[in-house]
Image (spheres, grey):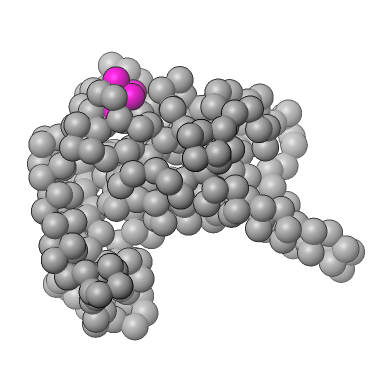
Amino acid sequence: MSRRARDESGAWVRRGRRPGLKPGTPTEDTALLRREEPGFLHEDPWRVLRIMSEFIEGFDVLATIPEAVCVFGSARAPQEDPSYAAAREVGAELAKAGFAVITGGGPGIMEAANRGCHEAGGLSVGCNIELPFEQKMNAYVDLGVEFRYFFVRKNMFVKYAEGFVVFPGGFGTLDEMFEALTLTQTGKIQHFPIVLFDRTYWAPLVDWLRGPVLGGGKVSPEDLDLFLLADEPAEVVEHIERVLKRRRRHEGPAGRPHVKPHKADAQ
């Protein structure tokens, strides 16, 4: 990772753009997940060190940010998409409420949320990912980190966010949403607000969860209370603040939430 500047805490900061991979060049994730001949034993132990260094650098850069909320959504949403305007407003409202905003650092909904936060004077954070095609860090990121490995990046999202706001999106957005729901359902993270923005978009998925998934006993009724459907930016901030206030009331002597999860594993 190119080390261009340091933030006030002395952590390395990656701000700006980097060139995409050349066509046909595999990403680090691709190399890690590919089944190899036994010769890979000479290479993978060194790859572990690279993974470790990526965790360390992510922790180093993000450890001192204020309370933050992750905003997810489609990278393909153009500026004229109503979701772009809504995400920009959500980013601004979160900043006004004192939250930093974390996104994947790319275009579309990510850019909109970073933009709203940046314009409102908040700390706009981007965690970009190496892809087979170029994905530039958007211009509204104040504090940015580049990641090679999806699983390292996803760890940073959960570790440094107090909640998730999920806008309409595709596979990547659904992946982040269901991971957060699973971690909350199983008690791995507690009092973690999750908001699905745009009731119309999410309604068919929620109907499916309430229908065959709940009806077939694959989830419990209370699992469907782990997220809120919202259409207004004010609803988003109010819900997040309400859940976090409840969490703070339950904090134990060590300053950490004391909750007894009723599930030992994902259903």
Total numbered circles: 0
Q: Residue at 43% of width from left, 46% of height from top?
A: 64
- Give percent across and percent down for residue 51: 66, 55
The quarter of the displayed image where residue 10 is located: top right
Compared with 36, 240 (above or below) is: above
In the current view of this chain or complex, which residue is farthest to the top? 80
User: For the C terminus, which image quadrant?
Assistant: bottom left
56 relative position to 92: left or right: right
Q: Nearer the viewer, residue 225 or 152?
A: 152
Q: Nearer the viewer, residue 93 or 138?
A: 93
Q: Per the image, is 118 magenta?
A: yes
- Give percent across and percent down for residue 214: 19, 71
56 relative position to 213: left or right: right
Q: Is residue 23 visible?
A: yes
Compared with 91, 69 (above or below) is: below
The quarter of the displayed image where residue 183 is located: bottom left
Q: Residue at 33% of width from left, 24% of height from top?
A: 118
- Residue range highlighted in magenta: 115-119
User: For the N terminus, which image quadrant?
Assistant: top right
264 relative position to 38: left or right: left
Magenta span: predominant SS is: helix
Q: Residue at 43% of width from left, 27% of height from top?
A: 141
Q: Residue at 18% of width from left, 56% of height from top?
A: 244
- Give percent across and percent down for residue 231: 12, 37
Q: Nearer the viewer, residue 253 or 126?
A: 253
- Give percent across and percent down for residue 72: 35, 41
Q: Per the image, is 86 magenta?
A: no
The quarter of the displayed image where residue 19 is located: top right
Q: Is residue 208 visible?
A: no
